[in-house]
Amino acid sequence: MAVKNPITMTCRGCQQPFSTFDPSRRNFCNKSCARRFHLSQRPPFDVRFMSNVAVAGPSECWIYRGSCDDLGYGRYGARQLKAHRISWQIHNGPITNGLWALHRCDNPPCVNPSHLFLGTSDDNNKDRSIKGRSRDQRGERHNMAKLTAEDVRAIRSIEGISHTTIAEKYGLSQAHVSKIKRGESWAHFVPVSTTEEGKSKQ
């Protein structure tokens, strides 16, 4: 409730006094202070990331339960960073520029740091060849694929339904559905027509 005369209060963020006419709605001296305070209350980055991981035994695969790309590799956050690279850095430290985080287990959604090792692009190609993954494994050819070509065609033809609802139906993330609609995902297998591209931007 607003008052006629200002009341002095202590800011929850900076702990400095400030004056307000509406003590029931003010806990901070300004919006910036409130933003900093709320950010400081968030769990650390590694805790937030690991909350998306099904941690198992030391020698077992730790499956990333967040969104994944077409090849089954986990993607984290708004920038869609590779989950297994994040896991390596959390447990082992920074990755030198030019190096890749590779899987010993050959299981894309696994982020167990003991199943990962660093190598160059050439090392990745050699490892892929040794494990028999040199052939084209895009789209439904990949053993981790959730969709078929017909599913993708159906998703792109759906109109009047939110991407969130479509994602729930097919067991995908909303971001993945949006990429399929825009042709950024599965474009190599089921090309998006000019008409579909126009509809996806509406």
Image: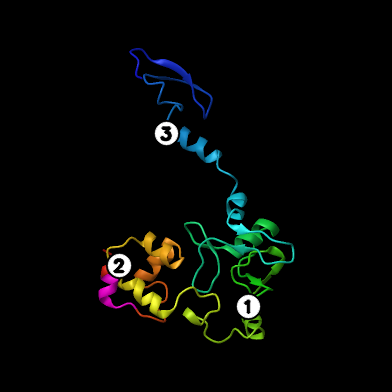
Q: Quadrant of residue 6?
A: top left
- Which residues lie in the magenta part? 192-198
Mark 1 falls on what kind of element?
Answer: helix
Tag 2 residue:
200
Report the quarter where the C terminus lies.
bottom left
Tag 1 residue:
124
The one of 171 and 33 positioned closer to us in this rendering = 171
Mark 2 falls on what kind of element?
Answer: helix
Q: Residue sitting at 33 percent across and 72 percent down? A: 156
Mark before the other along the chain sequence, 2 or 3: 3
Tag 3 residue:
31
Q: Residue sitting at 41 percent across and 61 percent down? A: 174
Relative placement, left or right, of 142 versus 129 is left
Residue 119 placed where, x, y %? 67, 73
Mark before the other along the chain sequence, 2 or 1: 1
In the rendered image of this protein, does residue 135 appear above or below residue 170? Answer: below
